[in-house]
Amino acid sequence: MTKKKLIRMVVVCFVFLTCFGFTVLTAKDSKVVEDLPALKDAYADHFHIGASIAPYQLMGPHSDLLKKHYNMIVAENIMKPEGIQPVEGEFKFDQADAMIEFAKEHDMDVRFHTLVWHSQTPDWFFQDAEGKPMVVDGEVADPDNYETNRQLLLDRMETHIREVVSRYAHDIDSWDVVNEAIEGYGYRQSDYYIMTDTDYIHEAFRITADELEKQGATGKLYYNDYETQNIQKRDLIYEMAKEMIDAGIPIDGIGHQGHMSITHPPVPLLVDSIEKMASLGLDNQITELDMSIYISDTQASYGSYDNIPDGILETQAKRYQDLFKALREISDSVSSVVFWGIADDHTWLHDFPTQGRVNAPFVFDHEFQAKSGYYAITEHYEEKMLPATATNQYYYILLGSALLIAGTVYLFYLWKRQRRSY
Ligand code: GLA
């Protein structure tokens, strides 16, 4: 073989291998966000897919991702009592109104979080007529005026609930009526509980239902809490809900917050809890789903987002897969799954439990790209969804194969010609 021919063959082989490599790589990396099947479509037969949002996320890339993948929103903070009524009698609805408008415009459901909670509720709620705390060190501060103060607290709660519910009666699909009333081995010793026992819980549900009825609206009422898979806590929530049902107090479902890590809690325990609540005829929603990449509060930070090991994200993806598979199987009892954020750039976990510890709890990364977790919870649906990406892949594979055949034919032709010339 002449030197010239040898060079020509090497060049042809090089071009040929490059094309083939490009084909394989492009087929793998061609999934840009725009081409991906929407999470909400992938789960349309099962449950709503939601995200919690902050007001600034109604614009820009957050909003794009939100509109594409989610069909339910919940306010991360602004609908909490301190956001709506920071000063007694002064209601602030601007930001909540804007979120609800956004939801209407884009055909999304809305969860209201939350009417009653011991936290993120202004101090004035729990102060007597003179501005002194009704509860000090876990005790009723002024036993002589206990009845008056108890009633004052319940009246304030009622005013708050009626004002909010009458305004948004026709805009909200699911109401978190009470958040986190149970802790450890019993009812949380909050100011609400110390002043009213369980009356504040029962009254909150009654008042919300009553106001909805007055407005001719049909939103569903939820009790919401974390660690609902914990057997002790699960049973307490179950007993509370059962007592309410037996007493004719309206409740439609349980919100399981779903703050998780890559190891905790075991998915089957969450499934047990959902099934137990469902046995009372209650709906279930996962309301604040996120999955920390750390397995303890004290684990050292990975430092920066790019330093998070791929293996950790793969573990997370596998767990997301297990979780969503389990939820699909019991989706008759689950009406929505709401992430506590849209993408990894914005999450309370960057500062909790440790300030500045980078985290990556969602299925979209800090630059809004789909993570392995996204594929893990949608892969199952690829055939059904016929995603544009699949079309791209077929196109590239076809192109690669054509080049492969053309290259082989050309090589064969060169080899033949070379043999003839000897
Ligand atoms: C709880 C509350 C939420 C939120 C998270 C942390 O789960 O229900 O409103 O404050 O904590 O972000």
Image: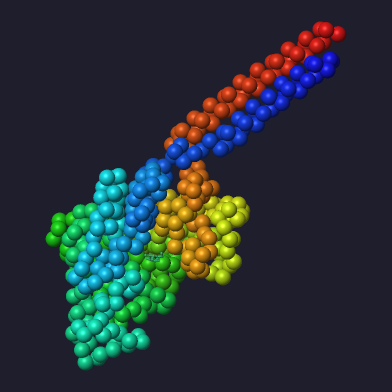
Report the number of discs: 0
Q: Position of residue 132 (x, y in %)?
A: 26, 85
Find residue 220 and report its image quarter.
bottom left
Residue 183 drawn at (x, y percent): 40, 75
Seen from the viewer's position, the closer of residues 267 and 85 is 85
Residue 288: x and y in percent read: 40, 60
Residue plotted at (47% across, 63% down): 349
> Which of the 4 image quarters holds residue 316?
bottom right
Reply above or below: 25 against 88.
Answer: above
Q: Is residue 249 visible?
A: no
Q: Residue at x 37, y 52 (%)?
A: 57
Query: Which quarter of the rendered picture does the C terminus lie within?
Result: top right
Furthest residue to the bottom? 144
Compared across the picture, whether 405 is left or right of 261 comes to right
Residue depicted at x 67% and y 29%: 18
Q: Is residue 38 visible?
A: yes
Q: Residue furthest right?
A: 422
